[in-house]
Amino acid sequence: QTVVTQEPSFSVSPGGTVTLTCALSSGSVSNSNYPSWYQQTPGQPPRTLIYSTDTRSSGVPDRFSGSILANKAALTITGAQADDESDYYCLVYLPGGTWVFGGGTRLTVL
Amino acid sequence: QLQMQESGPGLVKPSETLSLTCIVSGDSVSSSYYYWGWIRQPPGKGLEWIATIYYSGSTYFDPSLNSRVTISMDMANNQLSLRLTSVTAADTAVYYCARIPLAGPKPYYMDVWGRGTTVTVSS
């Protein structure tokens, strides 16, 4: 079964830049996997940040950006703020119509 | 404004069948522009995709749950349903429904989420 791997945790200073990644056990992540990213705080449903690799969802600040880096999907936060402290999940679409979430990255801003 | 509201029994006994409903308002589950899906999150753990359905009847399932899951839609009442048989404690989770827009013929991300319903499997 395909596994999607994210860094379990990451730390960034306020105002700093951080890149979270999303790797596919079966090979490279590409645009055809439509990688998307979700932000979740405790007790809340996920919030859609990025879809189709690099498209920001409505209302998402431009400090969030998505890309493919070294065969992985990537989420970059430029100028991190305190309220960016959250769990971040990537989601990839697989041939055959199935989906897999990454295990999530807990981001600490301090 | 699209809203999605999940509901369920709250508590289910091991080996029984879990049935969940997601009422959709502000859009139609019979729309050709969207798939609809179910996702869950066990306590303290990450998100898990469960199943997806299209108005045409096409369905897709997580392979690890395939044999226990049924997903359906009731177009008359504009709602989705999920049925999970032979539940165990490992099925304890918050269950979310979500709308999934299409990119051409393919569903490509979850754009609107319900607030989730908590299900505990315990005797």
Image: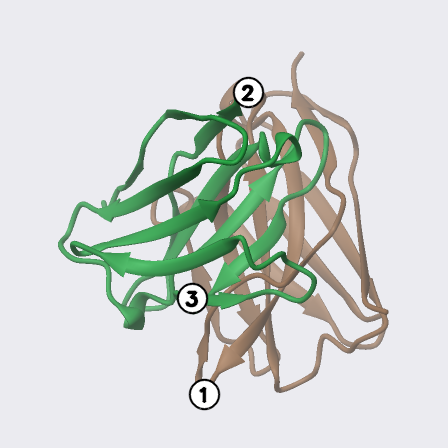
Q: Colour of chain A?
A: green
Q: Are marks 1 and 3 on the same chain?
A: no
Quadrant holding the N terminus of chain B: bottom right
Given the image, what chain letter belongs to the residue carrying mark 3? A
Q: CA gap, disc 1 to disc 3?
A: 17 Å
Given the image, what chain letter belongs to the residue carrying mark 1? B
Q: Which residue is mark 1?
A: B104
Tell me which amino acid carries mark 1: Gly
Q: Which residue is mark 2?
A: B44
Tell me which residue sits at (74%, 51%) in the image: B114
Q: CA gap, disc 2 to disc 3?
A: 28 Å
Q: Residue furthest top?
A: B123
Given the image, what chain letter belongs to the residue carrying mark 2? B
Q: Is residue A86 left or right of residue A5?
A: right
Q: Are marks 2 and 3 in contact (CB under 8 Å)?
A: no
User: For the residues carrying marks 1 and 3, which lies nearer the camera in this image?
Assistant: 3
SS state under label 1: loop
Tell me which residue sits at (39%, 26%) in the image: A10
**Is residue B122 shown above or below B21?**
above
Q: Colour of chain B?
A: brown
Q: Residue A76 appears at what percent x and percent y?
A: 41, 48
Q: Which residue is mark 3?
A: A54
Q: Which mark is residue B13?
A: none
Tell me which amino acid carries mark 3: Asp
Q: Residue B74 appears at what percent x and percent y?
A: 75, 70
